């Protein structure tokens, strides 16, 4: 039986290759050269088992969009998303003094098995002036590589602790005054092929034409995004799923909503502060768990639901 292959170029990136020889994930933790893009680790390229790239990197419209990455667009006056910052009444402005960064501090956990890679990463969130604001423990697990199903899964977890002597205030452009622009949190930027793709959720019909616009700002256990590629006769589907605790009002620090667009750019974010701000007191922590399924083919609602049910948390 063939196995996952994992390579680690120390100080730069970790790459995961599926048993069929396709590199399905590259996680880059080398600091980016451009501070304005908010230096932080990211996953790109991400590929299906058939080799279709499903992430975009530094697209011409938003150079700070890099594959799959953890972000925080409005955090106590700082921007850990990158690029221009939204200021109510003035729009988006280039304010480099607001751009924070996330420093890679090491991998205290690194487990490789035949069918699984599980890493734990320590990071520090640093505001533009150099003050350390938060400590993050991040988990990345590649699992359930299934050539018959044409799919594999990435679990991404975050536990963030406030190391400031005052609360951290999490928001978004919408909490700052821009309607329906609540982006923040774990964000995916799709490759150009996904522009205009089909988006559906658990309680919608994949063929009903509901689309990204109707799902913007909504809540559901999962969201799926499917597209037909250029160059090759093939479709791909990405599924973004919450762990049950993320949507539990008793355990989650704040309600999560979808930030999703198919036009003019393809992007999804698990927004943790879409409509309202929330505070993290000094010394306190919060945690979220996410799952991203990367699949070949044009999946529908039933197939997504059945597949997710087969992957318990």
Image (cartoon, grey):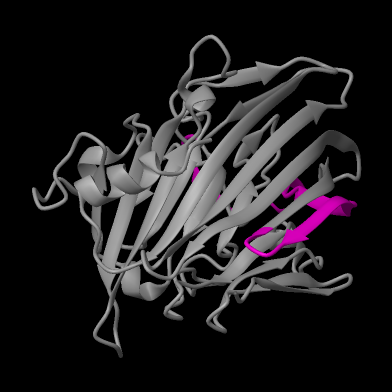
Using the image as rendered, state which of residue 185 and residue 173 is in the foreground. 185
Q: Is residue 223 left or right of residue 4?
A: left
> In the picture, which quadrant includes the N terminus?
bottom right
Using the image as rendered, state which of residue 100 and residue 211 is in the foreground. 211
The magenta segment = 88-116
**In the rendering, at what x and y percent does residue 142 appear?**
61, 57
- Residue sitting at the far bottom: 231
Residue pictured at 41% horizontal, 56% vertical: 267
- Residue sitting at the far left: 208
Q: Is residue 273 left or right of residue 237?
A: right
The image shows a total of numbered marks equal to 0
The answer to whether residue 115 is magenta is yes
Residue pictured at 25% horizontal, 51% vertical: 303
Using the image as rendered, state which of residue 260 and residue 130 is in the foreground. 260
Residue pictured at 31% horizontal, 31% vertical: 218
* Quarter of the view holding residue 222: top left
The answer to whether residue 9 is magenta is no
* Quarter of the view holding residue 190: bottom left
On the question of residue 278 being in view, the answer is yes
- Residue sitting at the far front: 1
Q: Is residue 77 left or right of residue 290?
A: right
């Amino acid at each position: 039986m063939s196995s996952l292959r994992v390579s680690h170029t120390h100080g730069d990136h970790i790459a995961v290759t599926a048993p069929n020889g396709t590199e399905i994930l590259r996680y880059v933790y080398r600091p980016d050269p451009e501070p304005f893009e908010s230096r932080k680790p990211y996953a790109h390229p991400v590929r299906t088992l058939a080799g279709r790239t499903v992430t975009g990197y530094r697209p011409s419209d938003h150079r700070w969009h890099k594959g799959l990455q953890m972000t925080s667009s409005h955090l106590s006056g700082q921007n850990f998303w990158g690029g221009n910052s939204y200021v109510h009444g003035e729009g988006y402005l280039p304010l480099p003094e607001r751009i924070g960064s996330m420093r890679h501090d090491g991998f205290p956990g690194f487990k490789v098995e035949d069918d699984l890679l599980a890493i734990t990463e320590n990071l520090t969130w640093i505001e533009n002036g150099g003050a350390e604001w938060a400590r993050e423990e991040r988990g990345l697990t590649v699992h359930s590589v299934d050539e018959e199903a044409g799919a594999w899964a990435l679990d991404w977890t975050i536990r963030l602790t406030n190391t400031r002597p005052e609360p951290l205030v999490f928001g978004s452009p919408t909490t700052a005054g821009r309607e329906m622009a609540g982006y923040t949190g774990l964000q995916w930027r799709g490759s150009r092929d996904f522009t205009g793709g089909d988006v559906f959720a658990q309680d919608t019909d994949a063929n009903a034409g509901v689309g990204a616009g109707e799902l913007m700002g909504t809540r559901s256990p999962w969201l799926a995004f499917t597209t037909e590629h250029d160059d090759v006769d093939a479709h791909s589907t990405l599924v973004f799923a919450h762990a049950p605790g993320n949507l539990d009002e008793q355990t989650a620090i704040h309600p999560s909503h979808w930030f999703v667009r198919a036009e003019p750019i393809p992007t999804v974010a698990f927004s943790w502060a879409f409509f309202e701000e929330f505070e993290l007191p000094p010394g306190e922590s919060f945690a979220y768990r996410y799952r991203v399924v990367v699949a070949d083919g044009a999946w529908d609602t039933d197939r997504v639901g059945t597949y997710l049910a087969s992957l318990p948390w």
